[in-house]
Image (spheres, rainbow, N blue to C red):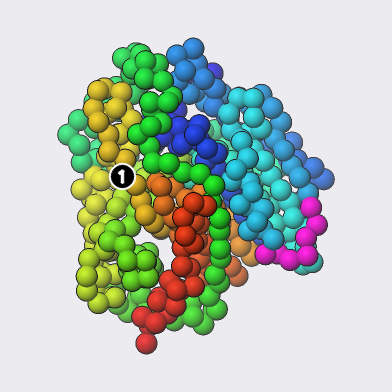
Amino acid sequence: MDRLLSPNEAKFWLLDWVAPMNSVVVVQRAAAYPHRGAPARFTVPVVHLDPQSRPRWGPGDRAGVLLREDVTDEANWLSAAQHLLDVRVGNAGQPPWHAVVQSYPGGTTLLLSLNHALTDWRTSLQVAHAFLADEYPGPLAPPCEEMLPRTLFGAADADAMIDAWWSSRATARWHALGLEALTAILPRQGATRFAVCRLTPDDTAKLQDCCDAEGATLNGALAVALRDTMQIDRVAHAVDMARFIRPPPAPGPGLAVAHVFTPLGPGSFWHAARDNRAELFAQIRDGAAGDILLELPRLLLGGTPEYQPATMTITGAPTVGQSDIADPQATMCLVVSSARGGGGIIIISSHRGALQLIAGSPVDQPDVPLDAIVARLLAACP
């Protein structure tokens, strides 16, 4: 077996131990699926438990699963993605991946389900590109915690926490606590239902022009729209930490996503959106995103981590770097993940160049009011 999972990888794996925690890559192409069957050269590692019950990366021991189906409408991808979030993949004794290829008049959709401990948005797209090209996607990236500059951590003991993760003391503590206790500190997540809303190209351009003129980001505007429609006072943001790593990680599987929370205070729409942008950057600068990666090591050394539940999380394409698959036939590339942190999720993506928002709602909670959120965004633009 290969190296231990890093702290961040292990967190997503622990979530997966409770209920499937997958990333589902969705690639629509105005072309046929390029292979007769599964790609021959495509392989990804899976998680094995060592004698101390610590998860380690190693080679797959099962074949991946590829299903093909004919559908009447390209919109059938959403229900298929929702199903693939709940299949078991990425552990020893399970398929390393599970794919569905949908053929419809005018094109095909690839849906590729991977364990979230293996990939985030950026790397899921890279891995899907290798799948379509029938290529080896590349070696697993080193732990992002070790590649990040120390300025990205706020904790004075960050180096000690990272070093301790790999120690025999941490291994003994992991084994003593057991998986039940280790998962008890994490927010619950489970089955999710999804809805999608596609803006027109004109509305997309209008919203982006408005964000630019107001000095705000789409994420900031979306956060305020959540405030106004759901009456929430803070929101979680997924942060692609790979943009802070120099040199950039090579293409291939790897996990470099963190989450930070920003408050949603009172004030006019665009004033609050600018504040949200500034607060997000300040949180990253002060080390909040890096510090969340240290919570599991802190637990193993006797500390008390505080994983905060998130009413809503905003995620989507990375701010910097490859956000699309280099495929002239592609009309839509995105990654769907389940509602995390105990609440809902909004996924920012695009379809044929226009903004597309996907809302995920835990099955035991009310629907995220997606139509009202979009209406609030557009109402803020004169």
Residue positioned 25% across, 77% down in the render: 268
Observer-nearest of 118 and 365: 365
Observer-nearest of 14 and 116: 14
Q: Is residue 226 magenta?
A: no
Observer-nearest of 245 and 211: 211
Residue positioned 46% across, 36% down in the render: 15
Q: Quadrant of residue 30?
A: bottom right
Mark 1, secondary structure of its residue: loop
The residue beneath circle 1 is 308
CA neighbours of label 1 inside 10 A, class few (<14), some (14 to 19), many (20+)? some
Q: Quadrant of the C terminus?
A: bottom left
| In-image side of 58 versus 135 (left or right) | left
Expressed as whole percent of the image width and height from the top left, the position of residue 59 reads: 60, 24
Q: Which residues are magenta?
A: 69-75
Expressed as whole percent of the image width and height from the top left, the position of residue 257 reads: 41, 45
Residue positioned 53% across, 75% down in the render: 199
Where 226 sits versus 128, above or below?
below
Expressed as whole percent of the image width and height from the top left, the position of residue 186 reads: 38, 37
The residue furthest left is: 156
The amino acid at mark 1 is Gln
Q: Quadrant of residue 242?
A: top left
Residue positioned 46% across, 67% down in the render: 369
